Image (tube, rainbow, N blue to C red):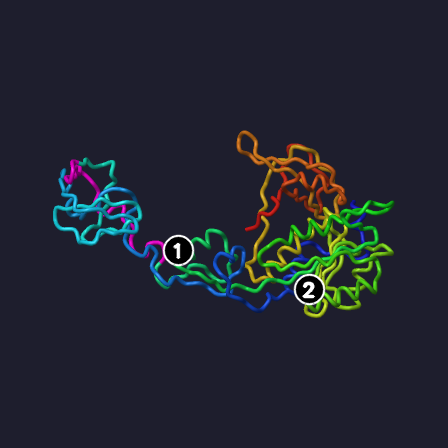
Amino acid sequence: MDVCSQERKPLLSLAAALSNISAAIQPVNGSETITLKDALGRVLSAAIHSPINIPYDRNAAMDGYACAGKELNGQPVTLTLAGTSWAGRPFQDALQAGQCVRIFTGAVVPDGADTVIMQEQVQVDGETIQFPANLKPQQNVRAVGEDVGQGQALCAHPKKLTAVDLGLLASAGIADVPVKRQLKIAFFSTGDELAALGEPLAAGKLYDSNRYLLNGLLADPCHAVADGGVVADDPKQLEDTLRAAAEKHDVLITTGGASVGDADYVQEVLARCGQVHFWKIAIKPGKPLAFGKIGGCYFFGLPGNPAAVMATFQQLVAPALRQLSGAPAAHPLRLAATCTTALKKSPGRLEFQRGNLSQNADGELIVASAGNQGSHVLSSLSQANCFIVLPSECAGINPGERVIVEPFSTWL
């Protein structure tokens, strides 16, 4: 058995921890109106309806010749060219009997026409256009409001806006959008052993990688992020820092100091200046995770090892931030794959091992270990593109067995 899973009190499962967090969190209040070009990735605070029909006019679906469908009676027919309808420069008159117009994709279909015949199907002789037999009338014309009707919803609330959403809103002439305000997030590293980049390393020191990892993980248009630097292993300094930061932010995140060592003060300080909702969960890496509140500010005390930071952030912090931002609930995409390497594991905790997911020549998903699974090892995390999710009861995987994988940064 995994010795780290053997505690006097059973460790909290990941599912129970997520449920605990979800029950404790309320989305932030407040919204703002921003320009469409700045709205990518933001969460709508109200639904947006189209002020116009899309398309606004009947228009051609392809280059060709517009005519009245009744002119096409199944027999060859010759029509007279009355003019041209360009995209942005419509033909101004109504078609008369026996006439057609040259038309280009997206151009307005003139009154009197309801059909566009593609240019490859006709023969042109000056202003005489010959149409063959058996042409289908009323084709290749886009109807007014075919995509979205005036007054219909373009984007529902809440929705995290994508690039496609921005295009859709622009097609309706929407220049400004109402969005939820950004989450105010501060993060810190803790530990006397941490050295700043650019400083020479002394014995017992290591460079602080976690703040750079967290800064990247928190990069999201919904977040206003502040790097709080490094806090020493001093309980009073840590308490003073957290209290001050909690007054200005919606979320605080620390790394390190959440374990059970003599210099690990996070859980103790959180209990003194706020509320501890839970501490320690049954996952690997990432057991020593604390969640609670300091006043109205939510607090996540992540482990100090970088692989554990990545795992706990993806599994617990990321969904909490989505909920806080008002975005719809999302779940990590998990897929079945064949494991091509042996994986070591002891029963006891749900485990997230680093893997490389790919497809073989037959298109089947395969995954291999990305290397050393030590929670302090960043190189294998850098080389990985997924987690291999191994249930708590799993006692190891042999090559050829099926496993569940979770690609990095893929949420539904």
- Of 50 and 400, the residue lying toward us: 50
Query: Which residue is painted at 24% across and 48% down in the image?
Result: 85
Circle 2 or circle 1, nearest the eye: 1
| Residue 127 lies in the magenta stretch | yes
| Residue 170: quarter of image | bottom left
Disc 1 residue type?
A: Ser
- Of 280 and 32, the residue lying toward us: 32
- 268 to the left or right of 179: right
Q: Is residue 118 depicted above or below 49 in this figure?
A: above
- 87 to the left or right of 351: left
Label drawn at residue 298: 2
- Of 142 and 267, the residue lying toward us: 142
**Circle nearer the N terminus (2, 1):** 1
Work out whether residue 289 can be spotted: no
The N terminus: image quadrant: top right
Q: Position of residue 321 (x, y in %)?
A: 62, 59
Query: Magenta segment, which residues?
Result: 125-148
Q: Position of residue 367 (x, y in %)?
A: 63, 36
Q: Is residue 181 depicted above or below 106 in this figure?
A: below
Q: Secondary structure at mark 1?
A: helix
Query: Which residue is painted at 57% across and 31% down in the image?
Result: 360
Query: Which residue is painted at 68% across and 69% down in the image?
Result: 296
Q: Position of residue 33 (x, y in %)?
A: 50, 65
- Of 234 and 288, the residue lying toward us: 234
Work out whether residue 329 can be spotted: yes
| Residue 324 lies in the magenta stretch | no
Disc 2 residue type?
A: Tyr
What predominant SS class does the magenta segment belong to?
A: loop
Label drawn at residue 171: 1
The residues bearing labels 2 and 1 have C-alpha atoms spaced at a distance of 39 Å
- Dot 1 surroundings within 10 Å: few (below 14), some, or many (20 or more)? some
- Dot 2 surroundings within 10 Å: few (below 14), some, or many (20 or more)? many
